[in-house]
Image (spheres, rainbow, N blue to C red):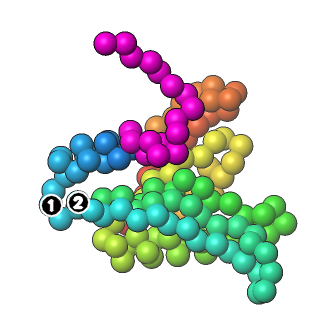
Amino acid sequence: MSLMILNNVDPINKDYVSNKMIEFNLQHFPENLRGRYQELNLQLVTEGGPIIGGIVGEFCWNWLEIHYLFVEPEHRKLGYGRALLREAETMAQEKECDFIKLDTLSFQALDFYLKEGFQIYGTIENAGRHTHYYLKKDI
């Protein structure tokens, strides 16, 4: 048998690996946590206007993982990031999540997340010449 490694997967098979991992993982989680997956997409918009920020993440088993939190530069330091984060946290509590996790780079929003009650649980030095922080907040 000859095997090949492809790097341009056809659209029909693009989810094969992630679907197989989910299938495998489900065998190892308690029954009450199985099937607890939902994408999170919050958008911050001006009245009748464009999107100026938002959060992208996912509720997964007993946690919320935030992949991206962004607010346009001219709208920062006005409480919008905090409002987005609080809305996501409220949703996580309603879904009976135990914690929120996220990551940030040293030039991004570490101080903001620390002020919001997140704690650093890991770092990677020299990630693009910066420090990559992994944070968690119990809720």
Magenta stretch prevailing secondary structure: loop
> 128 or 42, which lies in front?
42
Task: Report the front residue among 3 and 55.
Answer: 3
Where is the C terminus found, in terms of image quarters? bottom left
The residue lying furthest to the left in this view is: 31
Task: Tell me if residue 55 comes above or below residue 22 in the rendering.
Answer: below
Determine the residue located farthest toward the bottom in the rendered image: 47
Residue shown at the point (84%, 66%) measured from the top left: 74
| Disc 2 residue type (three-letter) | Arg
* Element type at mark 1: helix
Is 20 included in the stretch rendered in magenta? Answer: no
The residue type indicated by label 1 comes to Glu
Rendering quarter of residue 15:
top left
Mark 2 lies on a secondary structure that is loop
Task: List x then y, in percent, for residue 67.
Answer: 54, 53
Residue on which disc 1 sits: 31
How far across and down, in percent of the image, does residue 19 sit? 35, 47
Q: Which residues are magenta?
A: 1-17
Q: Quadrant of residue 38?
A: bottom left
Q: CA distance from mark 1 to mark 2?
A: 5 Å
Residue drawn at 66 percent across, 52 percent down: 109
Q: Which residue is mark 2?
A: 34
